[in-house]
Structure formats: structure tokens, C-alpha cells
Amino acid sequence: MSNKGSCLCGEVQFEIEGDFNKFFLCHCSRCRKGTGTAHAANLFSSTATINWLSGKERIKTYHLPETQHARSFCTNCGSVLPIEIAGGKLIMVPAGGLDDDVSIKPTAHIFMDDRANWEDSLNDTERFKTIPK
């Protein structure tokens, strides 16, 4: 299986060759800070590979000191990008960075004890198809 993806500005383009094993919605404070949202939505694979189609020179990786937390992003637009973790034995792909439909459903919500205090009320929040007037 193959999935293509890109950053917001289009400078970085990539292709993931292989299947995803897990799809985690991570609610830890580090993922919330890194995404600015209630949770990160990351796909994981121990068998897939990342092929950088363009813009590899625009990628910067940040490793949070004294932790295993890391994220890669486009230095032009800031979009989060795939990263090899666990010594290259695992890849993590932000689901929102894929241009193709995701073939796997979320596997689990993780780090729920660390979730934002406002997150539990999200299901009761008004919904709009576009930005409200």
C-alpha cells in the first residue's frame, strides 16, 4: 500500500510505502503543545518506509531533551511531518499530513489522564459546516 502526503505550503512531499499498524489519538500535554489541538492523530508502522519526494532540506526535527518525544516539521509552513522513531524501527506519520484517505480507523485514545480539562465538553459543542458568522 502507498500513501502520499505533503505539508501545508506544498514544499515537502512524501510517500509512505507499506501498511500502518496503529492509529493513536494522543492526548498528552507534549502532543497538545506540538499540535495546538486537543490531541495528536498519528499513524504508526514498523514495516513501512518514508520516501521524500521533495523538500527534504526544509525538514527540521526537534527532540525534547531527556525524553523520547520528537517531531519533524516543515521550516517554511510549520506543518508536522513523518518521523522515524525508536532508532528507525518505527515511523510515525501525522494523519492530517496525508493527501490520501486514511485506510485504518483510530486504534485508541492514549494518555487520557493527561487530556485537557476542556476536552470532555467537545461532544456537546455546537458544530458548523464552515466558519460561523
Image: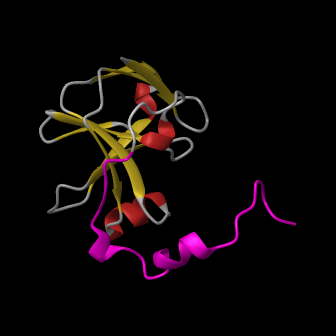
* Quarter of image, res 127: bottom right
**Residue stretch in magenta:** 106-133
Q: Which residue is drawn at 60% across and 75% down?
A: 124
Q: Which residue is drawn at 55% across and 29% down?
A: 11
Name above or below for residue 130 compared with residue 52. Answer: below
* Quarter of image, res 34: bottom left
Residue 84 placement, left or right of 120: left
Taking depth in this image into account, of 5 and 8 the one nearest to the observer is 5
Q: Residue at x 35, y 65 (%)?
A: 27
Count of picture labels: 0
Name above or below for residue 127 compared with residue 40. Answer: below
Q: Which residue is drawn at 30% across and 75% down?
A: 114
Residue 2 placement, left or right of 54: left
Q: Where does residue 15 sit, x and y in percent of width and height?
A: 41, 21
Is residue 95 magenta-colored? no
Image quarter in which the N terminus is found: top left
